[in-house]
Amino acid sequence: MINLIKTFINKVLRSLFKKKKNIKLGLYGPPNGGKTTLANRICKDWLGEDMGTVSNIAHETREIQIKEQINIKSKGKELTFNLVDTPGIATKIDFEDFVKAGLKEKQAKQRAKEATKGVIDSIKWLDEMDAVIIVLDATKDPFTQVNITIVGNLQARNIPVLIVANKSDLKKADVKKVQSSYPQYSVIGISAKYGNNIDKFYEGLFAIAG
């Protein structure tokens, strides 16, 4: 029953923006979930170039990044969209965490300031999105305050969603736990870093934005 309702809602929402020429597809999620790694994977696969810089330190992406006119193909279908990589959303940003990660105090404070602005911008940009991919680290608890906040904002706006359980190549990854936490959405386990299951991910994009 849930799947039938999910399919119906997605069909209705897709019809609302099907005629739009510039579909905005947003990448959302907490810091270090792998949003930019996935953005780079998509851009490499279809444009032959990277989109942004990846780092082990949280909040590497602190500004909205857009790559326009990405055209993907899957099973005879084509989809063109503008990919929007957003800063990671967090409920708390403390410069001391950046100091612990190896940054000097001045750099850490600047990064914290930029990261805070990035979170605000990410939320604002939700109103611009036609569809959203939520990128979660499958090795971590999916049912956090940050993730619930992201999902709640998307549900309030009736935006079509695909959840990616990233880092599925790691031993601690639990894709089923992500799925059970958000049964209202389709969840696909992938490794953005190595490209595992990426074809199924592209099929999933057509389900929400095709």
Image (tube, rainbow, N blue to C red):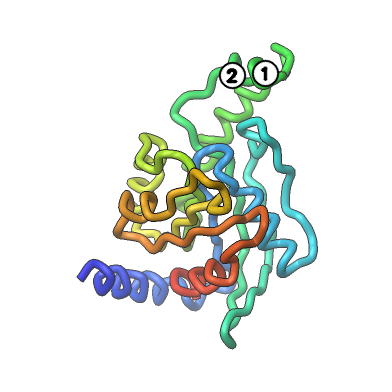
Depth order, front residue of 90/56: 56
Residue 183 place in picture, x, y as percent? 30, 57
Q: CA distance from mark 1 to mark 2?
A: 8 Å
Residue plotted at (47% across, 24% down): 92
Residue 50 place in picture, x, y as percent? 76, 55
The residue at which mark 2 appears reads as 97
Q: Amino acid at mark 1?
A: Ala
The residue at which mark 1 appears reads as 108
Residue 14 place in picture, x, y as percent? 41, 73
Left-right relation of 178 to 133: left
Is any atom of residue 79 visible in this view?
yes
Left-right relation of 132 to 100: left
> Furthest-front residue in view?
171
| Residue 112 quadrant | top right
* Residue 104 to residue 113: above or below: above
| Residue 77 quadrant | bottom right
* Residue 12 to residue 92: above or below: below
Mark 2 burial class by Cα count in 10 Å: few <14, some 14-19, many 20+: some
Residue plotted at (66% across, 24% down): 111
Left-right relation of 137 to 196: left
Residue 114 place in picture, x, y as percent? 63, 28
Instruction: State the SS at label 2.
Output: helix
Q: Quadrant of the N terminus?
A: bottom left
